[in-house]
Amino acid sequence: MGTFVLLALLAGAGYLFVYKRFAGPDHSRYDQPFLDLRKLPDEISDQHLAVVGRVRRFARDSATTTAAARIQMDEFLHQEVDATIENTVCNGVPGEWVTTANSDPDKRLLYLHGGAFRVGSPLSHRYITSELARRAGVSVLAIDYRMQPEYKTIACHEDARTAYRWMLDNGPAGTDDVAGKVFVAGDSAGGNMTLALTAWVRDQPIQKIDGAIAMAPLADATYSSPSFRRNLATDPFLGPALGTFARIPPFLFAMFSSRNLGASPRSPEVSPLLGPLDGLPPTLLQVSNAEMLYDDAVRYYNKAREAGSPVELQVWPTLVHVFQAFGPELPEAQDALSLQADFLKGC
């Protein structure tokens, strides 16, 4: 009996240690419902059903190796675009300038692609970057940052910081003038990097960000937001890949994933929601209420607004994760990108 009690005490102590180290702080007070939808559910276009079918087939046939998955993602999302693509290197970080006829070289936007810090590239997200360049009249710098499993997640953030500093003094086509205005945008994992970068720049003695856009951002690497589990069945993009992990307690999932972070999942470096959100630039969040990351956006919005930061949240019903990437076939994506352009023009 004594041995059993001792083992039980040790197990309980271990459980508490893991919980305190990896569980996210309680942010449930920022879960106020957000009901200001851009459309009603029955107003979503019929084209969305075809997009859902494409996404489900993509998830079903997902590659088993990282190298193959990267090729698959590029092929899945890539669209031919009417834009000038200029390869560049940002102090060691490869990338590309995406510009159109109306792109202002003094208005520069750093784009951070999504893909779970593991897949995705400037190629896969070229539709979004070219549309932002065309609609908002900005010059877009999309970087090919280091990713897992070769590097830790923190390396992604380091590359974003390096590229941002470089962009301040370097523009497209040999432009060496200091940037007039600077913006940052990203989706999913890139949205995580965008929100983390805005807080980092806020605290640095460098040119500040004039506006930021985060599409369905991962804001909390402890995976504590309720929609991460509630929306498992309604997110055909993330659900199949994360379904098994989403069914275990959040702090255990955070523990398992932390080995790839290079930082504590509670650190604002990788969980921007968990840091101070005052003094941020104008920020636009876009998300679908069917996404697993929906509540990350809601919590970030409510906490940032409470802290006095000018953050706007735009929500659509039903739509797939990062629906903006399906613009050529999805009217809602066109609407969202137009709203992004309006936001950038107003910053």
Image: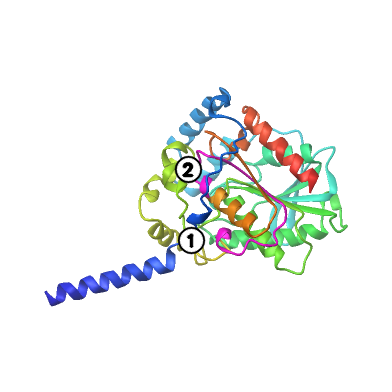
**Which mark is first along the chain, 2 or 1?**
2
Q: Quadrant of residue 201?
A: bottom right
Q: Which mark is residue 238?
A: 2
From this view, report whether residue 252 is shown above or below residue 227: below
From this viewpoint, is residue 15 visible? yes
Q: Residue furthest left?
A: 1
Q: How many marks?
A: 2
The residue indicated by pointer 1 is: 260
In x, y percent, where is residue 48?
Answer: 55, 27
Q: Residue at x 20, y 76 (%)?
A: 6
Secondary structure found at label 2: loop
Q: What range is drawn magenta here?
A: 271-295
| Mark 1: amino acid | Asn
Q: Nearer the viewer, residue 315 or 136?
A: 315
Q: Nearer the viewer, residue 72 or 13?
A: 13
Q: Which mark is residue 169?
A: none
In x, y percent, where is residue 244?
Answer: 37, 47
From this view, report whether residue 195 is shown above or below residue 134: below
- Mark 2 packing: few (<14 Cα in 10 Å), some, or many (20+)? many
Quadrant where the N terminus is found in the figure:
bottom left
1 and 2 marks in contact (CB < 8 Å): no
Left or right of 114, for residue 162: right
Judging from the image, the colouring scheme is rainbow
Q: Quadrant of residue 305?
A: bottom right
| Mark 2: amino acid | Leu
Q: Is residue 289 magenta?
A: yes
Q: Is residue 250 magenta?
A: no
Q: Residue at x 70, y 68 (%)?
A: 203
